[in-house]
Image (cartoon, grey):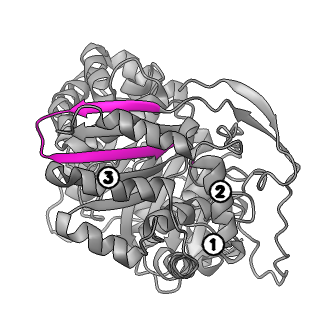
Amino acid sequence: MKTRLVLLMLAVGCGPSLPRATGEIPPIDTDEQIEEVVVDTTTTIEREDLGVAQLVEARSDSPIVTLRVVFDAGSAEDPEGHEGLARLAARLRVEGGAGERSYAELVRALYPMAGSIDASVSREQTAFVGRVHRDHLDAFYAIFREVLTRPRYDERDFERLLARAKSALSLELRGSDDETLGKELLHAMLYEEHPYGHPELGTERGLDALTRQDVLDFAARFHCGGRAVVGVAGAYPEGFADRVMEDLAGLDSDRCVGRRVLPEPATPGVRVWIADKSDAQSVAMSLGVPLDVTRDHPDYPALTLAAAWLGQHRTFAGWLMNEMRGKRGLNYGDYAYAEHFEQEGWSRFPAPHTARRQQYFSFWIRPVPREKAHFALRFAVKAFREQTRTGMTQADLDRIRTFIEGYFALYLQTESRALGFSVDDRYYDTADPWLEGLRAAWRELTVEQVNAALRRHVDPQNLQIALVASDAASFADQLASEVASPMRHAGATVPDDVRAMDEQVASYRLGIPRERMRVIPAVELFAR
């Protein structure tokens, strides 16, 4: 849906306003007390118009019927001081009972029909996904409809899910998942003082402030037909999709509002932030720059092709993967992305419903042993600066284009995934289906066009570097010192070209002064 801007005045009593959310990280060693959260309900917020509900159908002979109801409202709509509300509202809708059923009764009803109902929340989208065999569609849909239109939002389930969210933030994200923590830290840098700046999980302060009433208010404002795209796939009966659309109309209320207008990301220049985590066994690295290109932009195909050449996710097709892991054994994987990437489950493929109006170009350097981390970071920064400036050769283009032409087709290997990407096409309002348009554009691209797109949109002068490491202050000192960091190979024989590049990388100047580096205790990340 293309952007049409309006200015909406929010009246007192019509739900909390949404002043700009912040990913701000508190200063080190602060004793400042967290003040009581007060949500201003009179703030004027610029918003897009509400639009109308849309339908995407993918009828087939598949006996599995998939329903996807996707609202264009995610964690970017969290009110300031209530970060985590969008995600909790989605989880409580599917895990808080519906109609006359408690959550336990709902699970028992779904079990014999092998049906599933789940929810996901990204920065800009909330998706409710149901799947069942067509023989059980009527009974299943009766439950799915109640989840959408008559959620119970049980108080006990609210407390349970809130406790789970707090645990996921403190024990999982900050406690045991260094890679995801590094990615979220990169978001906080790229989107400082911006609605994208905090994790979907929320912040400690935000989760502590949430109430069940906040969930009810959020759902009334954002889980409504004017913000929805409905997808239906499989061998469903005639008239079923229309029935879903009619039921969805019952969600509309006079409190529904359109998407907030996003501020432009700040461009503070090159920075390094390091999350100091005493038990980190290695160093997780995420590097990125803001990007003014999304799927509806003419340069999007060129940038996706270039990212695949640099580092296709979990394959050896990419240059980074071959150089950093294949030739040097630095880590498990090294990848590049021309848009936000979220892996679906344990697959290597992107999940649907992570669409965004603002994107970023990034390198994900999976954790590297501390003794090789300085060299690895130098390698990644050097690659980011030089490869995005000089680009690929004709041979590079021919090779990667041949690979991705077939590989990207695997993204559509299930009807459910294909339906998800079709729903996302409505978000971007693209003329052609996502992968169909990409593959057609790739066949026509020249190497000069790809390299020009990289130079136009990927600016290393705005590079943000997020690290997770132990003894972070000393690591920052080491990075700023520009001391040589020679690569030590495990094998005795090293090819001459690899050794020559190693010597260049070992003395490569990052050129980032210590005052541009910030050390933050990991336990303080996303506390406020």
In front of the other: 407 or 216: 216
Residue 307 quadrant = top left
Secondary structure predominantly adopted by residues drawn in magenta: strand
Q: CA distance from mark 1 to mark 2?
A: 25 Å
- The amino acid on which the numbered mark 2 sits, given as a three-letter code, is Phe
Q: Earlier in the sequence, mark 1 or mark 2?
A: 2
Q: Residue at point 66% right, 37% down?
A: 258
Disc 1 packing (10 Å; few <14; some 14–19; many ≥20): many
Residue to which mark 3 is pinned: 141
Mark 1, secondary structure of its residue: loop
- The amino acid on which the numbered mark 1 sits, given as a three-letter code, is Leu
Disc 3 packing (10 Å; few <14; some 14–19; many ≥20): some
In front of the other: 281 or 444: 444
Q: Position of residue 413 (x, y in %)?
A: 16, 42
Q: CA distance from mark 2 to mark 3?
A: 24 Å
Q: CA distance from mark 1 to mark 3?
A: 41 Å
* Residue 415 higher or lower than 526, as above or below: above
Numbered range of the magenta stretch: 54-73
Q: Residue at point 45% right, 72% down?
A: 178
- From the viewer's perspective, tell me whether residue 272 is left or right of residue 377: right
Q: Residue at point 53% right, 29% down?
A: 457
- From the viewer's perspective, tell me whether residue 158 is left or right of residue 299: right
- Please tell me whether residue 60 belongs to the stretch shown in magenta: yes
Residue to which mark 2 is pinned: 218
